[in-house]
């Protein structure tokens, strides 16, 4: 059987209006509030708020940092420069602080973000002041970790805030003629980006496709990678044009 893989048409299927509306339910973090433990405000200096989409202990990026000693007996608020969406968000206490903080709150606009609490286990002298005391809506209790260093407390917002793997139709394989390939995502509000002109793709830098794109005759490493991803046999002359979004 003669294998023809000279061209491919990539179609990014848009989401329906119903799915786009559902996407609004995913909370984008816009601001953070925290309340110091009684008499321990100085222990929050250089603490960080971070986010990750990889797991509760890996892949965290700094979202905000406490650069001044917060005032005692009152809330301090940090507003992010732009909304961000992470499944795992947490407060990472500076070393030597025992994780001391009375309350931590995360917000999407005026709505407080809720999730499944997580944090470092235990408390000092097994007194019961574990990480849950920092997210119990009670400023009279506080987190006092089992160790002075590497203490954190945060929320897991659940799988609904993460994009599911893209689906392809037809399924990857070997074909006797060029194929039109649709790429879709079951996640409401998700955006599919390509890396046709980039050797190193990134979710924030890939191109957003707004219309079907026929393959051309120009060699391009990004398209070869995409073809391998799709299970097609790439030739030496491929190009997947894309449009920045």
Image (tube, grey):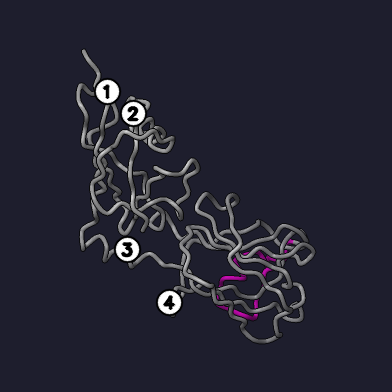
- Nearer the viewer's eye, disc 4 or disc 3? 3
Q: Which residue is mark 1?
A: 174
- Nearer the viewer's eye, disc 1 or disc 4? 1
Name the image quarter holding the C terminus: bottom left
Using the rendered view, name the quadrant where residue 218 is placed: top left
- Nearer the viewer's eye, disc 3 or disc 1? 1
Q: Which residue is mark 3?
A: 23
Q: Which residue is mark 4?
A: 111
Mark 4 to mark 3 CA distance (whole Å): 16 Å
- Nearer the viewer's eye, disc 2 or disc 3? 2
Q: Secondary structure at mark 1?
A: loop
Q: Which mark is residue 61?
A: none
As drawn, 72 above or below 57: below
- Going from the N terminus, do you reach mark 4 or mark 2 first? 4
Where does residue 53 sit, x and y in percent of width and height?
A: 50, 53
Name the image quarter holding the N terminus: top left
**Residue neighbourhood size for the residue with mark 1, other residues' Cα within 10 Å, grouped as few (<14), some (14–19), many (≥20):** some
Q: Which residue is mark 2?
A: 231
- Going from the N terminus, do you reach mark 2 or mark 1 first? 1
Foreground pick, 46 / 127: 46
Range of residues picked out in magenta: 126-143
């Amino acid at each position: 059987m003669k294998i023809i893989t000279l061209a491919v048409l990539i179609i990014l299927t848009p989401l329906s209006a119903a799915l786009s509306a559902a996407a609004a339910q995913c909370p984008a973090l816009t601001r953070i509030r925290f309340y110091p433990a009684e008499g321990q405000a100085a222990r929050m200096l250089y603490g960080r708020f971070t986010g990750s989409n990889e797991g509760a202990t890996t892949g965290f990026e700094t979202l905000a940092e406490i650069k001044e000693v917060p005032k005692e007996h009152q809330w301090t608020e940090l507003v992010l420069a732009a909304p961000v969406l992470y499944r795992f968000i947490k407060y990472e206490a500076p070393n030597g602080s025992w994780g001391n903080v009375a309350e931590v709150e995360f917000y999407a606009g005026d709505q407080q973000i809720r999730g499944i609490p997580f944090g470092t286990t235990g408390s000092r002298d097994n007194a019961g002041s574990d990480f849950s005391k920092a997210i119990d809506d009670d400023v009279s209790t506080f987190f006092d970790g089992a160790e002075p260093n590497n203490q954190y407390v945060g929320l897991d917002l659940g799988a609904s805030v993460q994009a599911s793997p893209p689906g392809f139709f037809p399924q990857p394989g070997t074909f006797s003629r060029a194929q039109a390939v649709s790429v879709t995502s079951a996640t409401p509000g998700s955006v599919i980006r390509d890396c046709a002109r980039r050797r190193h793709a990134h979710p924030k830098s890939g191109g957003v496709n707004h219309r079907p794109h026929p393959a051309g005759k120009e060699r391009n490493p990004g398209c070869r990678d995409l073809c391998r991803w799709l299970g097609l046999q790439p030739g030496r002359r491929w190009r997947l044009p894309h449009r920045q979004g």
